[in-house]
Image: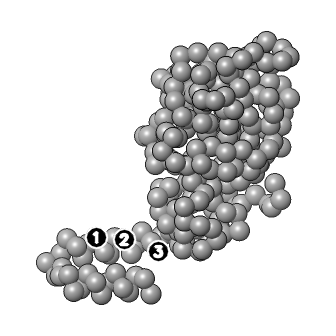
């Protein structure tokens, strides 16, 4: 990472916000195009009842359709596991499945989810597959994936620590990840500490507008005026 980790209080505040209001807050700063920075419909939140996930990205790439060139042990990932600890906690493991199409075999299931939790990881994001859903759900470890598979097939990490792409989202090592039932996005680090306050203002504006729409004072003319005030 090129910057210092955010204060834990900021991470806690971000973790209390939905991904939708975080996205709206990010848009207000104008630091990136509005059609960038989040995953598309190819990625699915596996455990929709879990709270939002916040953490720093630890990236890797895998294959599962063909055997690895070296070693045939699915759990032979010591070098990669060691590299995870270079990313500050909380960690979100983000892995691009390089098979075409991705997702033949699942890299993370019950065992690997518990290994990653023990290594300070709070979630797993992949365009590939996951498995052992009931067992992983009980741990509170969140997963976002392109699909579900019964087998890990030949899943193996073939490189790590580089820039990857997951469902239209470019992820670099150390990127701040935020995700919930709606999907996954990155939060630009240069504005991250300002996002919670902006999000709270947006939530209050939404609350006021919704209350007005439900009130006896509602009229189209007043609605136009209120919306115009929000734009200014």
Q: Secondary structure at mark 1?
A: helix
How far from the left and from the top, in percent, is residue 6? 71, 60
Q: Earlier in the sequence, mark 1 or mark 3?
A: 3
Work out whether residue 9 or residue 72 is closer to the camera in this orientation and state it: 72
Q: Secondary structure at mark 2?
A: helix
Q: Which residue is mark 3?
A: 201
In this image, 156 relative to 51: left or right?
A: right
Mark pair 2, 1: CA separation: 6 Å
In this image, 164 relative to 127: left or right?
A: right
Q: Earlier in the sequence, mark 3 or mark 2?
A: 3
Q: Examine the rendering and report whether any part of residue 98 can be seen.
A: yes
Please tell me in which quadrant of the rendered image residue 84 appears.
Answer: top right
Q: Which residue is mark 2?
A: 206
Q: Which residue is mark 1?
A: 210
Q: Secondary structure at mark 3?
A: helix
How far from the left and from the top, in percent, is residue 102? 61, 30
The answer to whether marks 2 and 1 mark residues whose Cβ atoms lie closer than 8 Å is: yes
The answer to whether marks 1 and 3 mark residues whose Cβ atoms lie closer than 8 Å is: no
How far from the left and from the top, in percent, is residue 69? 83, 18
Mark pair 3, 2: CA separation: 9 Å
Q: Could you tell me which residue is drawn at 63 percent across and 29 percent down?
A: 100
Density class for disc 3 (Cα within 10 Å; few <14, some 14-19, many ≥20) is: few
Density class for disc 2 (Cα within 10 Å; few <14, some 14-19, many ≥20) is: few
Please tell me in which quadrant of the rendered image residue 27 appears.
Answer: bottom right
Q: Could you tell me which residue is drawn at 48 percent across and 44 percent down?
A: 41
């Amino acid at each position: 990472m090129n910057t210092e980790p955010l204060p834990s209080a900021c991470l806690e505040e971000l973790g209390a916000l939905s991904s939708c209001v975080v996205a709206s807050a990010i848009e207000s700063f104008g630091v990136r195009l509005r059609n960038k920075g989040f995953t598309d419909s190819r990625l699915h939140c596996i455990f929709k009842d879990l709270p939002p996930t916040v953490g720093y990205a630890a990236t890797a790439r895998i294959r599962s359709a063909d055997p690895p060139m070296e070693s045939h042990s699915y759990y032979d990932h010591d070098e990669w596991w060691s590299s995870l600890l270079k990313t500050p906690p909380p960690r979100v493991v983000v892995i691009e499945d390089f098979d075409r199409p991705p997702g033949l075999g699942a890299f993370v299931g019950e065992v690997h989810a518990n290994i990653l939790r023990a290594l300070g990881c709070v979630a797993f994001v992949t365009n590939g597959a996951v498995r052992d859903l009931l067992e992983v759900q009980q741990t509170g470890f969140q997963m976002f994936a392109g699909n579900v598979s019964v087998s890990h097939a030949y899943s193996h990490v073939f490189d790590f620590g580089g820039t990857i792409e997951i469902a239209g989202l470019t992820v670099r090592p150390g990127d701040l990840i935020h995700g919930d039932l709606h999907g996954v996005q990155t939060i630009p680090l240069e504005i991250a500490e300002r996002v919670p306050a902006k999000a709270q203002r947006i939530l209050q504006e939404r609350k006021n507008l919704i209350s007005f729409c439900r009130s006896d004072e509602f009229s189209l003319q007043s609605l136009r005026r209120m919306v115009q005030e929000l734009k200014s």
